[in-house]
Image (tube, coloured by chain):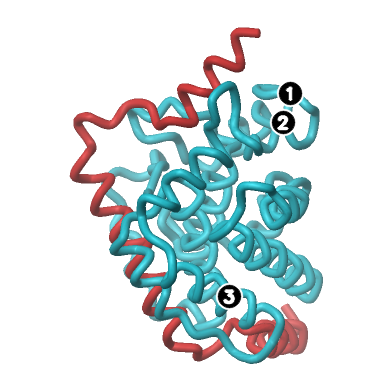
Chain colours: A cyan, B red
Amino acid sequence: MQAFENTASPASENFAGEELVSEEDRLRAQIYRLIAVFLSCPPTQKNLKKVSGIKGDDGEFGRALNSFAKIAGNTNEKAVDTEFHDLFIGVTRGELLPFGSYYQTGFLHEKPLARLRTDMAEMGIERVEGLKEPEDHIASVLEIMAGLIEGTYDRRASLAEQKVFFDRHVNSWASQFFTDLENAGNSVLYSPLGSVGRLFMDIEREAFDMS
Amino acid sequence: MPDKPTTDRRSFLKLAGMSTAGAVTVAAGTVAADARESLQKEESGYSETEHVKKVYELARF
């Protein structure tokens, strides 16, 4: 996906310090990316096959990952494409509108989007050229979280900086969106992905409170 | 920064599932890498995703 690029430093070779990211943080970034990838566009058969191999642990979050993996292994690209279309695109509109502004104000392109754009500009992150999608799409803000953790945009963000972005642009609405995704009438593969997302937001919220 | 909160946070994350489970690491990591590759390949022709078009339709009202 990588819908955003860093504008603060040219051609940043930003993974130099990657080995310094703890295993927990690397996994956090990967879960953010995993969810973002599946919400940005319908998955390919190749990616379905890959995630079908995910094995979580016995905890609630691990079990949600296992449900997601199991359904991914039993479905196919065509079925998921239809599901994605019904959920997010639709004939007049999809069942869900996965945008922060819509979730927080009831309208698209409102103040939450403006605030996000302001914060992104300050961090030196902007959409890649040609991508016209509003930045407050769920996949976008999750991708930015992954980038902040991994240091994709110039440098790794501190936990305090991650928390600021999370509180302002993710925590305010993502849990509600994931709950809606879990319960959406058209959700099959996306229902357990919604559970993964909702539980992951709980984990993130609690972990940030400890930082 | 005191050391303890960091340790607590790490233990909590591990308990919550952010640990080993090597399979998650590998699968999630490669999915993300693939998505990056495919976007790079499409770069020149990449303009509007399906839901973007839909948003612009909705925004007209």
Label 2: few (<14), some or many (≥20) within 10 Å? some
State whether discs 1 and 2 lie on one chain: yes
Tell me which residue sits at (53%, 68%) in the image: A31
Q: Chain of mark 3?
A: A
Task: Name the image quarter holding residue B47.
Answer: top left
Marks 2 and 3 sit apart, C-alpha to C-alpha, by 29 Å
- Vertical arrangement, residue B56 with respect to residue A76, above or below: above
User: Can you give x and y, in whole percent of width and height, for residue A8 in the image?
Assistant: 41, 42
Where does the image place residue A151, in percent across and percent down from the top left? 45, 61
Q: Secondary structure at mark 2?
A: helix
Does label 2 or label 3 sit earlier along the sequence? 3
Residue at numbered disc 3: A67
**Quarter of the image holding residue B10?**
bottom right
For the image, the number of numbered tags is: 3
> Callout 3 environment at 10 Å: few (<14), some (14 to 19), or many (20+)?
many
- Residue drawn at x 54%, y 25% as measured from the top left: A91
Q: Which residue is mark 2?
A: A102
**Residue A124 percent location from the top left of the image:** 48, 40
Task: State whether discs 2 and 3 lie on one chain.
Answer: yes
> Could you tell me the amino acid type at mark 2?
Tyr
In this rendering, is residue A39 above or below A105? below
- Of the numbered discs 3 and 1, the one sitting upstream in the chain is 3
The image position of residue A178, as x and y in percent, is 69, 54
Q: Which residue type does callout 1 highlight? A: Phe
Q: Is residue A55 left or right of residue A48?
A: right
The mark found on residue A107 in the picture is 1
Describe residue A129's horizontal placement relative to residue A62 as left or right.
Answer: left
